[in-house]
Image (cartoon, helix red, strand yellow):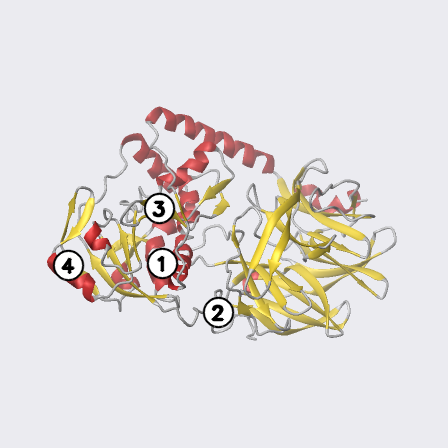
């Protein structure tokens, strides 16, 4: 383990291809070499995946697609100017610089009846490249004879894919309709018809088309690589009819801008002079039913002044209840790990910090294995996930193993089924992150012991759904069902806790289904709840709210 926790080689997120599989040879056709950053990163990702190899770029200089005009063009320009870091997704990148070693060929072509046709020399070039897959960007769909030159797939993106300004208008639809989630994936023409592949669900950036589009486009590199990996394994990816969204007129756009302003006011005005604050609540008695969880009779815990506690994790040791939490001082806003004993009245006693590093720490989970106590902690800022062993429970811990390295890992959760150890975690693959939205993709790893070595599960990613991917506490049994708590981060980060029943879990397969959820409605003023823990007859949950900044130091007096 390195000093910073970042190793030389990142942990593999996907299982190796089966023995009968082979890497796909991919040939890319584009209308230009100066392309948006999301597209450059998509092609760069194909050079690093073990499922395919990018063998050549073919530049096909056809006239570009018609650009947006009038009121729509003016709206897109204004929205882009206000999008901040989201502009990185569509910034221009020269592929000759990004992929300098890749062979480049200029190929003449024509568009006939809305299809791309190459001459005999161009077809001979493609045939000689022995392409398994043809990918097209900024071009009309391939004609039948051209598409037939690819042995596995011919996928041509929308005609405006190389236009950083006008591409992706369909990502305006969720904002237009006020939806909290946006359906991503890619829309391609496969030589016969338009298909929607790799559909996922991520949180909608509610106030900006450019930001919402960027969040979707920055998922394309991983999405396309996953689809090609499935092809290499011999599986045709499922397809759906593509979404449609008609370009709005000037009058409709004016009304939409007013709606955006109203949304911005509703979102930001309540935050003026306020800060986000987390609290903990607990109760004793019969555990909740994950199918119909009732969040009632929760007792707020008194926590120290000048900080908040979140991410609760309860364990019992020698008949005593110990509560591990993320402790975040208001002065630094940098999390550390603390522990306190809960007395018979569920009051925290003698709280102390047990882990404090140079970067943010959160989501502590404690496990018992091999006659010792073990602690896992989120440290995504260090791009790793480390396991600690107790030297003197509960206060002294030493790092013993780096379970995941070189990755932005959040809310890593270990589970032992009696034979194998499993590690659930949300991980971001985006090389150009906009909002650090590590909420959507759930990955699973398998090992014989918690010390590893860990290997990627063949079903990765298990989920690509912001509504129930991110872990929310340790897995637990309820009436013979294995339950995985998860977060719904669609409305906002940490909005609700969702309980999922794991219906199949082994080193080769995984399946789950959603059961019930805890909404942030069990106390006035709550805006979210995102971690659940139970042990020794006690249940505990965290929740967030907005409080006046000047009151934060006195919050502890109210939590009684």
Residue 83 x/y as whole percent = 41, 43
* The furthest residue to the top: 251
Quick one: SS at disc 3? strand
First reached walking from the N terminus: tag 4 or tag 2: 2
Residue that badge 2 annotates: 10
Query: Looking at the rendering, in which quadrant would you find the N terminus?
Result: bottom right
Asked if labels 2 and 3 touch by Cβ distance under 8 angstroms, the answer is no
First reached walking from the N terminus: tag 3 or tag 1: 1
Crowding near pointer 3: few (<14 within 10 Å), some, many (20+)?
Answer: many
Crowding near pointer 1: few (<14 within 10 Å), some, many (20+)?
Answer: many
User: Alpha carbon of mark 4 to alpha carbon of mark 1: how far?
Assistant: 26 Å
Viewer-closest of 134 and 74: 134
Q: Which mark is residue 122?
A: 4
**Closer mark to the observer between disc 4 and disc 2:** 4
Vertical side of 380 occupied by 9: above or below: below
Residue 37 x/y as whole percent = 34, 54
Q: Is residue 279 left or right of residue 227?
A: right
Residue that badge 1 annotates: 41
Residue 148 x/y as whole percent = 23, 56
Asked if labels 2 and 1 touch by Cβ distance under 8 angstroms, the answer is no
Residue 17 occupies quadrant? bottom left
Q: Residue at x 26, y 63 (%)?
A: 131
Crowding near pointer 4: few (<14 within 10 Å), some, many (20+)?
Answer: some
Quick one: SS at disc 4? helix
User: Alpha carbon of mark 4 to alpha carbon of mark 2: how far?
Assistant: 39 Å
**Closer mark to the observer between disc 4 and disc 3:** 3
Q: Residue at x 45, y 69 (%)?
A: 16
First reached walking from the N terminus: tag 4 or tag 3: 4
First reached walking from the N terminus: tag 3 or tag 2: 2
User: Alpha carbon of mark 3 to alpha carbon of mark 2: how far?
Assistant: 33 Å
């Amino acid at each position: 383990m390195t000093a910073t926790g970042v190793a030389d080689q990142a942990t593999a997120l996907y299982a190796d291809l089966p023995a009968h599989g082979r890497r796909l040879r991919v040939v890319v056709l584009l209308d230009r070499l100066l392309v948006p950053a999301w597209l450059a990163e998509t092609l760069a990702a194909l050079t690093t995946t073990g499922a395919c190899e990018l063998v050549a770029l073919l530049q096909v200089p056809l006239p570009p697609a018609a650009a947006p005009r009038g009121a729509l063009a003016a709206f897109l320009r204004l929205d882009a100017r206000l999008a901040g870091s989201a502009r990185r997704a569509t910034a221009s990148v020269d592929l000759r610089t990004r992929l300098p070693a890749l062979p480049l060929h200029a190929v003449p072509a024509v568009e006939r009846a809305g299809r791309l046709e190459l001459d005999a020399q161009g077809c001979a070039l493609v045939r000689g490249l022995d392409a398994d897959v043809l990918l097209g960007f900024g071009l009309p769909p391939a004609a039948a004879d051209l598409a037939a030159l690819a042995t596995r797939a011919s996928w041509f993106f929308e005609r405006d894919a190389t236009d950083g300004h006008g591409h992706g208008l369909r990502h305006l639809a969720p904002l237009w309709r006020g939806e909290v989630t946006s359906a991503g994936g890619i829309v391609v023409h496969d030589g016969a018809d338009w298909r929607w592949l790799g559909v996922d669900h991520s949180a909608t950036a509610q106030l900006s088309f450019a930001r919402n589009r960027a969040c979707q486009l920055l998922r394309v590199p991983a999405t396309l690589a996953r689809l090609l990996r499935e092809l290499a394994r011999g599986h045709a990816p499922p397809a759906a009819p593509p979404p449609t969204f008609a370009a709005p007129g000037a009058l409709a756009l004016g009304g939409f801008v007013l709606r955006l302003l109203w949304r911005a006011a509703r979102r930001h005005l309540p935050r003026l002079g306020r800060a986000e604050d987390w609290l903990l609540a607990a109760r004793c008695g019969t555990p909740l039913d994950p199918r119909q969880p009732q969040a009632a009779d929760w007792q707020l815990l008194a926590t120290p002044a000048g900080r908040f506690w979140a991410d609760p994790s309860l364990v019992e040791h020698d008949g005593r209840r110990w509560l591990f939490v993320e402790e975040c001082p208001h002065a630094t806003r940098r999390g550390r790990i603390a522990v306190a004993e809960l007395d018979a009245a569920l009051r925290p006693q003698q709280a102390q910090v047990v882990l404090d590093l140079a970067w943010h720490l959160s989501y502590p989970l404690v496990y018992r294995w091999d006659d010792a106590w073990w602690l896992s902690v989120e440290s995504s800022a260090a791009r790793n996930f480390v396991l600690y062993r107790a030297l003197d429970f509960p206060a002294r811990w030493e790092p013993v193993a780096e379970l995941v390295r070189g990755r932005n890992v959040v809310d890593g959760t270990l589970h032992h089924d009696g034979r194998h150890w499993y590690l659930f975690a949300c991980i971001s693959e985006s090389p150009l992150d906009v909002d650090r939205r590590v909420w959507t993709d759930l990955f699973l790893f398998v090992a014989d012991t918690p010390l590893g070595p860990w290997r990627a599960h063949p079903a990765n990613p298990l989920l690509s759904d912001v509504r129930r991917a991110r872990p929310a506490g340790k897995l637990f049994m309820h009436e013979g069902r294995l339950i995985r708590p998860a977060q719904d981060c669609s409305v906002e980060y940490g909005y609700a806790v969702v309980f999922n029943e794991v219906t199949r879990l082994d080193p080769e397969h995984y399946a789950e289904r959603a059961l019930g959820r805890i909404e942030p409605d069990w106390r006035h003023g709550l805006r979210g709840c995102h971690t659940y823990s139970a042990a020794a007859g006690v249940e505990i949950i965290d929740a967030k709210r907005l409080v006046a900044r000047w009151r934060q130091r006195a919050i502890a007096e109210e939590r009684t």
